[in-house]
């Protein structure tokens, strides 16, 4: 999990339009939308990693 006060990666300036506004991006693919703060990745990467069993404690819901 990423800390909110953590410094931004070096590639962040390439995507930032304005220096003040901070946008969350996926740590794996850089996707700006559908970002899960708890995991630091987008929904697409989250789904892929969950199916492969790479995220501990996450499994497909069944009810």
Image (cartoon, helix red, strand yellow):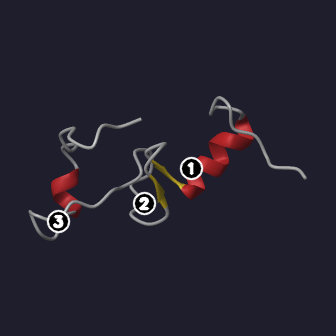
Give neighbour class at mark 3: few <14, some 14-19, many 20+ (Cα, 10 Å).
few
Q: Can you tell which quarter of the image residue 31 is in?
A: bottom left
Residue at 17 percent across and 65 percent down: it is: 21
The residue carrying mark 1 is 45
Q: Tell me the element at label 2.
A: loop
The residue carrying mark 2 is 31
Assign the N terminus to one quadrant of the image: top left
How far, Cα to Cα, is label 3 from label 2?
Answer: 16 Å
Name the mark nearer the viewer: 3 or 1: 3
Give neighbour class at mark 2: few <14, some 14-19, many 20+ (Cα, 10 Å).
some
Q: Position of residue 20 (x, y in %)?
A: 10, 63
Total label count? Answer: 3
Q: Tell me the element at label 3.
A: loop
Task: Tell me if residue 46 comes above or below residue 24 in the rendering.
Answer: above
Q: Can you tell which quarter of the image residue 8 is in?
A: top left
Residue at 43 percent across and 50 percent down: it is: 37
How far, Cα to Cα, is label 3 from label 1?
Answer: 24 Å
Q: Is residue 39 left or right of residue 50?
A: left
* First along the sequence among labels 3 and 1: 3
Q: Do tag 1 and tag 2 residues touch (Cβ < 8 Å)?
A: yes
Name the mark nearer the viewer: 3 or 2: 3
How far, Cα to Cα, is label 1 from label 2?
Answer: 9 Å
* First along the sequence among labels 3 and 2: 3
Task: Tell me if residue 11 comes above or below residue 33 in the rendering.
Answer: above
Q: Position of residue 12 (x, y in %)?
A: 21, 53
Residue at 22 percent across and 49 percent down: it is: 11
């Amino acid at each position: 999990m990423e800390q909110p006060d953590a410094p931004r990666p070096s590639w962040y300036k390439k995507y930032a339009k304005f220096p003040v506004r901070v946008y969350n991006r996926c740590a794996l693919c850089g996707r700006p939308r559908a970002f899960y703060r708890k995991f630091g990745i987008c929904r697409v990467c989250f789904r892929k990693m969950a199916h492969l069993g790479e995220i501990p404690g996450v499994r497909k819901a069944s009810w």
